[in-house]
Image (cartoon, helix red, strand yellow):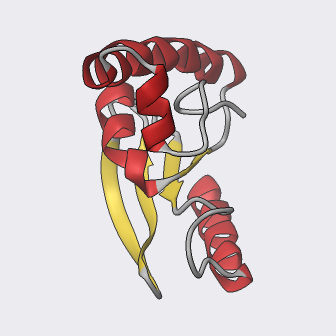
């Protein structure tokens, strides 16, 4: 398990204060750095699936990992799952953040788990 972005903060505003020239450094340099290392980890470990919490970061994942969109699965409060695949065919699922998404339920977790299991065996 790794993170799309290796540094954390309480929220995006706090992170903006910590990163000089936030827009250029974070989105062009830092995410590229993290993607380079994550791609090496993914290639080494050959996971059956990649799960990414946080729909906000989906666009950056698509750009930095060369993902191909398969489908979006609706939930009670918008998108529940964005299903993508890596160039090697590995499923990559993006979901709302499990600990901070408003209204995220155990039913939502169950649906994601079931979908992930089907994606692995497809």
Q: Quadrant of residue 22?
A: top left
Q: Is residue 20 above or below residue 75?
A: above
Whether residue 34 sits left or right of residue 22 in the image: it is right
Q: Nearer the viewer, residue 19 or 29?
A: 19
Q: Nearer the viewer, residue 21 or 99?
A: 21
Query: What is the x, y in percent for residue 118?
Result: 61, 65
Left or right: residue 60 compared with residue 17? left
Image point 53% across, 29% down: which residue?
Answer: 5
Q: Is 17 located above or below residue 33 in the figure?
A: below
- 78 relative to 39, above or below: below
Q: Indicate left or right for 48 with 57 as reference.
A: right
Quadrant of the image occupied by residue 79: bottom left
In the rendering, at what x and y percent does residue 110 appear?
71, 77
Q: Quadrant of residue 62?
A: top left
| Residue at (43% x, 19% y) in the render | 19
* Image position of 69 (left or right of 30): left
Quarter of the image with the N terminus is top right
Viewer-nearest residue: 62 or 24? 24
Residue under the image location 73 percent in, 81 percent down: 106
- Which quadrant does the C terminus fall into? bottom right
Expressed as whole percent of the image width and height from the top left, the position of residue 8 reads 61, 33
Compared with residue 51, is residue 106 higher up or lower down, i.e. above or below?
below
């Amino acid at each position: 398990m790794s993170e799309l972005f290796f540094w954390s903060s309480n929220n995006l505003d706090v992170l903006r204060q910590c990163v000089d020239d936030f827009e250029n450094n974070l989105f062009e340099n830092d995410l590229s750095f993290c993607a380079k290392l994550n791609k090496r980890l993914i290639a080494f470990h050959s996971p059956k699936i990649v799960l990414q919490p946080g729909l906000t970061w989906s666009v950056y994942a698509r750009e930095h990992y060369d993902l191909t969109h398969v489908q979006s699965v609706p939930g009670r409060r918008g998108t529940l799952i964005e299903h993508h695949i890596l160039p090697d065919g590995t499923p990559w699922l993006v979901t709302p953040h499990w600990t901070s998404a408003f209204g995220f339920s155990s039913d939502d977790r169950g649906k994601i788990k079931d979908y992930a299991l089907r994606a692995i065996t497809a």
